[in-house]
Amino acid sequence: MKNKHVIWVIIMFGAIWGILEATLGHVLQFLPPYVSGAVMFPIAASLLIIAHKNTMSLSSLIWIGLIAASVKAVNFLMPGLPAVKTYNPMIAIIMQSAVMAGAIAISSKVTMPEKFAIVMGASVLWRGLFVGNVYVNKMITGFNFPQIASADAVLSFVIIDGLIAGVVLAAAVYGLEVLFKRWNPVLRIGPALAVPMLVIAGVLTWFF
């Protein structure tokens, strides 16, 4: 029963992440990068923190990222959309879930200031990894991605935007810690809820 619960939590939270990427992420792309970066990663990380409270499994966070990335893969079916426009966001999602799994693992028994430092580091780290991925893409495709257009662009994307998002996430972590003291975040999730949410995520990804 517990394993079934974990499976449905993974699908549910992966679908929610996919829905947010398709809707909120679509809106945020019209705003300055530091604004979108300061919103989406903290929200996704907060989802993973709540999911971990439901599963108590770090590997489940990786699977949630894979589900969300799979939802994003629906865009591969859209004619005229360059594959890299779908591939890079998928890689970003997977990197975010992996980095947050590590952050949660090492922050379970630390002080709140240390936890803040860890999540801020996670915000910078996934961006650094993503820049490495983009450099590989450039070598393969020859396309000069905006994140690596110049040294200033790399610095802004990884450090400045990363720290801004990290501060927002640190505030979210504090809020969640306060909330968890008053609310048990363990949810009853089954196929009747998780499967329709996954379908909705796929449909929204196609239309947005």
Image (cartoon, helix red, strand yellow):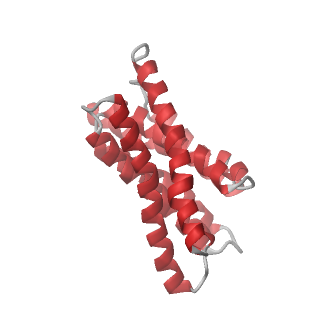
Query: Most extreme residue toward the right, as rendered?
Result: 30
Front-lying residue, 8 or 41: 41
Q: Residue at x 28, y 37 (%)?
A: 3
Q: Position of residue 163 (x, y in %)?
A: 51, 49
Depicted 6 relative to depicted 28: above or below: above
Residue 81: quadrant of the picture: bottom right
Is residue 59 visible in this depiction of the protein? yes
Q: Position of residue 50 (x, y in %)?
A: 42, 32
Query: Most extreme residue toward the top, as rendered?
Result: 182
Q: Residue at x 40, y 49 (%)?
A: 121
Q: Position of residue 99 (x, y in %)?
A: 37, 52
Q: Position of residue 27 (x, y in %)?
A: 72, 49
Number of numbered discs overlaid on the protein picture? 0
Front-lying residue, 18 or 154: 154
Residue 24: quadrant of the picture: top right
Is residue 12 visible in this depiction of the protein? no
Query: Most extreme residue toward the front, as rendered?
Result: 152
Q: Residue at x 50, y 51 (%)?
A: 68
